[in-house]
Image (cartoon, grey):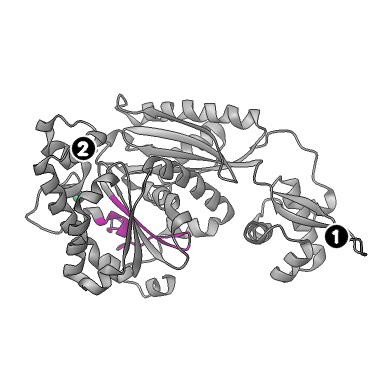
Amino acid sequence: MRARKKKELPAYIRERISLDEMLASRRVLQLVHEKGPITQGEASEALGLSQGACNLHFQRLEYEGLLRALRIEPEGRGPGRPSNHWEVAREQNATLGLVFDPPHVHVQLEDFTGTILFTQGASLRACRRSEKIGEKVCTLVARAMEEVKARRLLLRNAFAALPGVLDSSTGAVRRAVNFPALEGLDVSELMQRTFKLPTLANSLGAAYYYGEVASIPANNTALVMYWDLGLGFAFGRNRQLLTVHGGEDGGRMISELGHISIDAQGPRCHCGEKGCIEAYAGGWVLLQKFADQKVSTLEDLVALAQSGHPEFLKTLREISRLLGHHLAGAIQMLGVSEVRITGALAPLFQFGRIEFFEGLSEVIGIHRSAGIQVQVTEDPKASLLAGATRAARRAYLYPDEFNRLSRLSITLQGQRMAEKL
Ligand SMILES: [Zn+2]
């Protein structure tokens, strides 16, 4: 997406760097993103490139609107010439986050500083088919595009966060038990066709994870549990999402921990199995179970707990113990030290915090469980939207990480898991 017509890139750069191949220049972009502002000399040394080659990449990235030079005057009155220090042009580059959080959809535009420039949502309650959902989303995106145009931004890409089981190659929704109208929705295709906007469709868990990363210490493996109508999980380390799966196709992914059966005789789940943890703790179960308390939204459930309803609080304590018990294995296996609870039902966690740790220590012992930090996200919706745009920025700057994600190459049984962790 270009905000304005540009003059052509000088032939001597065009002939020496393939414009289709962002690959070589991307290393330079990543370095400036991580270490900037830096000089070209510092970059050529860090990357082992000749000054001449480095200069071409800088010119090309400047031409693309990604980098800009700051002229820094030497200090004092002594000799020395002013030098150019380069940084990412954060204010003129932007990404879009599309969040499908049933029954709502949200679109948020942020520049590369993380400043929110546009945010709007719509209800999908009346939508019975994925086409209708597509129309609603396009209306919101079209409004965001007007903002892009008015501010003369360079919109780089979008990240669409979706619930349910996604097609691993396209990101289209294959199965969404808690909101079936989403099934068949291929957001990447829709955004490409309607707006020519490159869009990576991935799980809601990825957006929840990226919503938390800023506050997770380096080298800590984190488990993000998002608790809303369903129950989902994401794992990550050092701003990189870990995806683990158990088979070529249809194998249970670790993000689907909510649908691993803990009791073959347990209650029936939306997914068809019996005894999934979601069938005890998912928001849809709680809404059914306490229907006589006139709860119809997730917010009503939070209010019911806050009112001190004895039976609901008892249920929450039972669920929390079960959750702790159920998650202990994954926490132990992946070396998790930070747990984040987010999603619309996150405020319910405080009512069973003690029981969660009891359940955890039943499996991994008191000593190990005491070393685990559990934090409840204060504003889950804001974190989720910021997470989606942050994931888009990450996907633009570090596309390799996401290639790995969608190929889902790390198997639960495989040797490679230990290396990756
Ligand atoms: Zn299930």
50 above or below 198? below
User: Which quarter of the picture shows residue 162?
Assistant: top left
The residue under the point 30% across, 71% down is 333
The residue under the point 49% across, 36% down is 108
The amino acid marked with disc number 2 is: Leu
The amino acid marked with disc number 1 is: Pro
Residue 301: numbered disc: 2
Residue 137 shown left or right of residue 278 in the figure: right
Which one is earlier in the sequence, the residue at label 2 or at label 1?
Answer: 1
145 above or below 387? above
Which of these two is toward me, 268 or 283? 283
Q: Which residues are magenta?
A: 232-257
The residue to which callout 1 is attached is 74
In the rendered image, which quarter contains the N terminus?
top right
Residue 195 shown left or right of residue 66 in the figure: left
- Dot 1 crowding, Cα within 10 Å, few <14, some 14–19, many 20+: few
One can see residue 267 in this view: yes
- Residue 401 in percent (x, y) is at 50, 59
**Residue at disc 2, secondary structure:** helix
**Residue 125 falls within the magenta-colored stretch:** no
One can see residue 200 in this view: no
How far apart marks 2 and 1 lie (CA) works out to 61 Å
User: Which quarter of the picture shows residue 295?
Assistant: top left
Label 1 near ligand 1 (CB < 8 Å):
no
- Residue 313 in percent (x, y) is at 14, 46
Which of these two is toward me, 350 or 185? 350
Which of these two is toward me, 208 or 182? 208
**Residue 246 falls within the magenta-colored stretch:** yes
